[in-house]
Amino acid sequence: MFKGGFIQNLPKIYGLYTGGFIVFIILMAIMEQAGVSKEAIGIMFVAFTVAIYALIGWLSRTVQVDAYYVAGRQVPTVFNGMATAADWMSGASFVALAGGVYFGGYGYMAFLVGWTGGYVLVSTLLAPYLRKFGCYTVPDFIGTRYGGNGVRFCAVLVLVLASFTYVTAQINATGTIAARALQIPFELGVWVGLVSILLCSMLGGMRAVTWTQVAQYIVLIVAYLIPVFWISNRIGGGVFPHLMLGDEVARIGELEQSFGLVKNSAADIKAAGVPGGLKSIAVSHSGVPEGGMAVWKYISLAMCMMIGTASLPHILMRYFTTPSVKQARKSVAWSLFFIFLLYSSAPMLATLSKISLMDPNLPTGIIGKPISAVMAIDWVQAWSAQKQVFIADFNGDGILQLNEWFMRTGVVVLATPEVAGLPYVISGLVAAGGMAAAMSTADGLVLAIANALSHDVYFKMVDPKADVRKRLIVARVLLVVIGAAGAYIASMRITSILGAVAWAFDFAMSGLFFPLVLGVWWKRATREGAIAGILAGLASGTMYLIWVYPKFMGNAPWLGIDHLRFGMIGAPVCLIVMVVVSLMTKAPDAATQRMVEETRIPSGRTILGKQH
Amino acid sequence: MIQPLIYDKKPKGGKMSNKEKHWEKSKNHMIITLVIWFFFSTVIFMFGAEINSMTFLGYPLAYYMTAQGSLLAFVLLIFWFAGKQEDIDEECGFGEKEDN
């Protein structure tokens, strides 16, 4: 059946896999009809998919350095695109993005533009050049281009800070989903999640992560799109929601007018005992806030996310795995295409979810109905019991008003299938998709950190004479240690002090964006400039974060630059310091300049050897 | 004092080598791409409130652009960028042979 090697047969293998997954979904649907319990279906969905990833991880085990670090540089364009999309779309993207749009409206959607537009920067400024360079890790490029372990270490510092901020949130998400699906306590769920993550990455490094990420992408996109299309058709939104929900968006605008958008006071919320993290709709769905400050807040957030995207090492390193420079470029395009499929669906899901709840003409509508009737609905009871939804009758009229209905953001994705009356098998599918999204991102992040520490710190600084076997053992031990550290922090549930996922983007853009871009585009950039830029950018960004974040010093944001946007301080400082110090120091030597010129030419051999 | 770059000398006779021609074209291509990117990522949203009264496919325009339009523009832009850059590489003799 399979002629030729593994790479030639990829479309067939993943075609079969997708077919198998769909058969599995149908099987689950039949079992649901036959009376198998919801719990059993939830467990089977998560257990079956995780077992498949673990199997792929085991089949991809390797003892080669270049296979471990860059998947042997033989990942074809489209598959690398899928793997990057899974790497990119985190548990937060999957579970919280639609909810963010649901509650945040236009202002929040700056994230959608930011998290996609960044790929234009990746493809024009960085990915093809880093591929030509032939590095194993992002600090590997910085360390070789600028020369020296000092600058290499600075890059590792930024990488660890940015990636670790991100990874605890991912392990937290795998723990939450595993705990819910497998009916175990959260603290145990976190460790179950970690074991699943390590099964995918430990034996085969980048190679194993690549092939599991492709499998995870297929699960997560199927799990996201099926409910969106199904709900849209069920409530009469149109066969193809992305093009046909204009009327629904307009209708939500009318309903917002008739119900009234009311922002509850903090005192009211506290008095009614609304659980923390639950919100009510207070922002217009499709309206655009007026005024220069609103525009600036939108643009600055999108800009931070775009530049941050182009600086995140776990994304950049995916483009080290393609067979050629032109395939690296094309691969960025495919990545964004696969990301677009989910991101463009999130606002549609938010629209469908909102209209399902708000429109009194739909059987699912609850706003404007008597509270006693709403409380009797099955899904309201189930999700209230988990403190995911809450009703507070502020005006005491016994009718549910728009501002009296509270939900957690994740509920939009997790509960909408139930709200719209879809069978439970879809909810099981969504859980498997969320797990895939969180695991794939966690894998990419843990691997990025472990590779930087094993290749850049251990091999390049501590023991340059280490043989291949020893290097790979160190890499794997670090992988386990970092994963365990992340899981330990996640299990302590101190997320409130860890802050937002957006911080990872701000840290990365403060310390890495300009050293990377100028390393390719400005021959005059020097080692001293890079070190000064990285440290100054990181220090100024971090200090500003501490100064502005409400839980730290809590000062009023300067020019509207709040804690989500602190990269707006760090990155410009990094640029200015780097340029000034570079110009004050001795120009790079002829060999370095030739190396930069060589980097800019797509053809020919990589700068660093195949195995280094 | 600012040290000049060793390789910054202008080539003799004003004729550029293939390498320089390639880099010149690549740079221009990058700049054009980033101008288009800036338009769809930033300029449009500077006028979000103004353009939202217009509609596209029944959606308010600014809402559509942030939910779908700009995202789609980025996808198409990168495909176009990659294709055009390959042409530039070929033209200057730096195309990559292997097609695996």
Image: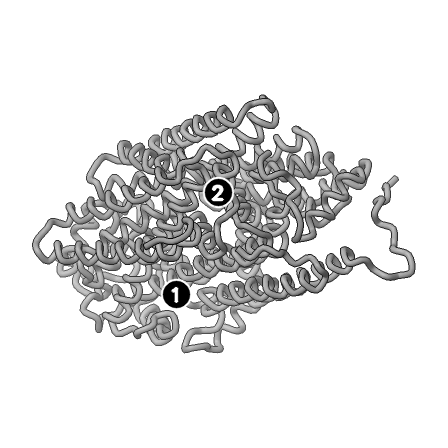
Q: Looking at the picture, how far across and down is residue A403, in whole percent?
A: 30, 59
Residue under label 2: A71
Residue A247 visible at all: yes
Q: Amino acid at mark 2?
A: Ala
Q: Is residue A268 visible?
A: no
Is residue B87 shown left or right of residue A60?
right
Identify the residue at horizontal 86%, vertical 61% (top origin): B15
For this rendering, which residue is in front, A568 or A205? A205
Q: Of helix, strand and loop, which one carries label 1?
A: loop
In the rendering, at what x and y percent does residue A428 appear? 22, 51
Both marks 1 and 2 on one chain: yes
Neighbourhood count class around disc 1 (C-alpha, 10 Å): few under 14, some 14–19, many 20 upward = many
Residue A227, horizontal then vertical, whole percent = 28, 61
- Quadrant assignment for the N terminus of chain A: bottom left
Q: Is residue A433 above or below residue A573?
A: below
The residue tagged 1 is A285
Q: Residue at x 8, y 53 (%)?
A: A35
| Chain letter of the residue beneath label 1 in the structure image | A
Closest to the observer, A503 or A47? A47
Near mark 2 (Cα within 10 A), the count class, few <14, some 14-19 or many ≥20, is: many
Chain for mark 2? A
Q: Is residue A389 left or right of residue A206?
A: left
Specify the quadrant that holds the C terminus of chain A. top right
Residue A273 quadrant: top left
Residue A25, image x, y percentages? 22, 56
Q: Which mark is residue A515?
A: none
